[in-house]
Image: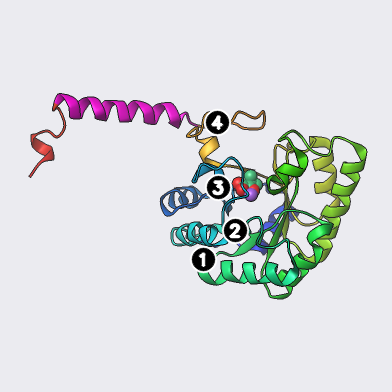
Amino acid sequence: YKRITVKSLVDMKKRGEKISMLTAYDFTMAKIVDGAGIDVILVGDSASNVMAGHETTLPITLDQMIYHAASVVRAIERSLVVVDIPFGSYQSDPKEALRSAIRIMKESGGHAVKVEGGKEIKESVKRILNAGIPVMGHLGLTPQSIYKFGTYTVRAKEEEEAEKLKEDALLLERAGCFAIVLEKVPAKLAKEVADSLTIPVIGIGAGNGVDGQVLVTHDMIGMTHEFNPRFLRRYLDLYNEMTGAFQNYIEDVKSGDFPSEKEQY
Ligand code: KIV
Ligand code: NA
């Protein structure tokens, strides 16, 4: 079937078709997510939390992101693969940003990169785009700036920050980004931004007035269970399902029930 491209996403917005996006960090998960028909797979730097157990997204390295992204790319047949450029690999200057984006494209085979921020990283965004690499923006709660914010609560509730967010969204569109993620901002503001742009706005905790939704896969299938924000809908309770399966296996091993006659050579 037809591969999703950055152009497909803009066309989807034009048609009013919502865009579905989920994270993946490895081959096996990516194969399931892609096979299910997701439009966009994000190799998020949330791998820092979900895969490596760090408290924030800051520690994950470019090499580690490339490893995750390459594993995902090997599994996909249809989805667009977007790869986060990690903290510290694009903020210093536009040349560093381009170098990092090029490494991701060459070494992982991903289709686009994502960066956090607006005006502050405008030159970097342009530089990456000039090399022919599609860029997805990310505004609102940008986890790489968590130590500046101090908390993971909703962003842009006040007029001043809301105005800056609207300006940044427009700036990213004009710079040439093909889409923007809006994380944890009031639904009314997110809708206003989505309505004002021709490129798609993909929300997480940004309400239903945007052009698509993204969730962290491990959260939405319930493999993680200590993270419970309001915006998270859980489609499975895998934490408990898997615990049950592991306990059954342990019991079967201890009792000698596993393996049976049929399960040996
Ligand atoms: O890293 C990530 O998973 C993300 C999404 C939450 C948008 O950036
Ligand atoms: Na991210």
Q: Which residues are magenta?
A: 236-255
* Residue 41 image offset from top left, x and y in percent: 56, 53
Within-10-Å neighbours for mark 4: few <14, some 14–19, many 20+: some
Where is residue 60? Give x, y as percent: 57, 53
Q: Residue at x 54, y 48 (%)?
A: 47
> For mark 3, does the 10 Å Cα neighbourhood hold few (<14), some (14 to 19), or many (20 or more) residues?
many
Marks 1 and 3 in Cβ contact (< 8 Å): no
Task: Say left or right for 12 vs 34.
Answer: right
Residue at the disc numbered 4: 234
Residue at image coords 60%, 28%? 228
Q: Does the magenta segment cover residue 200?
A: no
Q: Earlier in the sequence, mark 2 or mark 4?
A: 2
Percent coordinates x, y for residue 167 in the rendering: 88, 53
Could you classify mark 2 by the number of other residues whose Cα lies within 10 Å: few (under 14), some (14-19), or many (20 or more)?
many
Find numbered disc 2 in the image and state the secondary structure of the residue it sits on: strand
Label 1, on which residue?
Answer: 108
Residue 61 appears left or right of 192: left
* Of the image marks 1 and 2, the number of the one nearer the N terminus: 2
Task: Check whether the beta carbons of the residues at disc 1 and disc 2 lie within 8 A of each other.
Answer: yes
Decide which of tag 4 and tag 3 comes sooner along the chain: 3
Of pointers 2 and 3, the one earlier in the residue sequence: 3
Q: Main secondary structure of the magenta part?
A: helix
Q: Is residue 45 left or right of residue 178?
A: left
Q: Which residue is mark 3?
A: 48
In this view, the mark in front (2 or 3): 3
Q: Are marks 2 and 3 in contact (CB under 8 Å)?
A: no
Instruction: Provide the residue designation for mark 2.
Output: 83
Q: How many marks?
A: 4
Q: Amino acid at mark 3?
A: Ser
* Tag nearer the camera, 1 or 3: 3
Amino acid type, mark 1? Ser
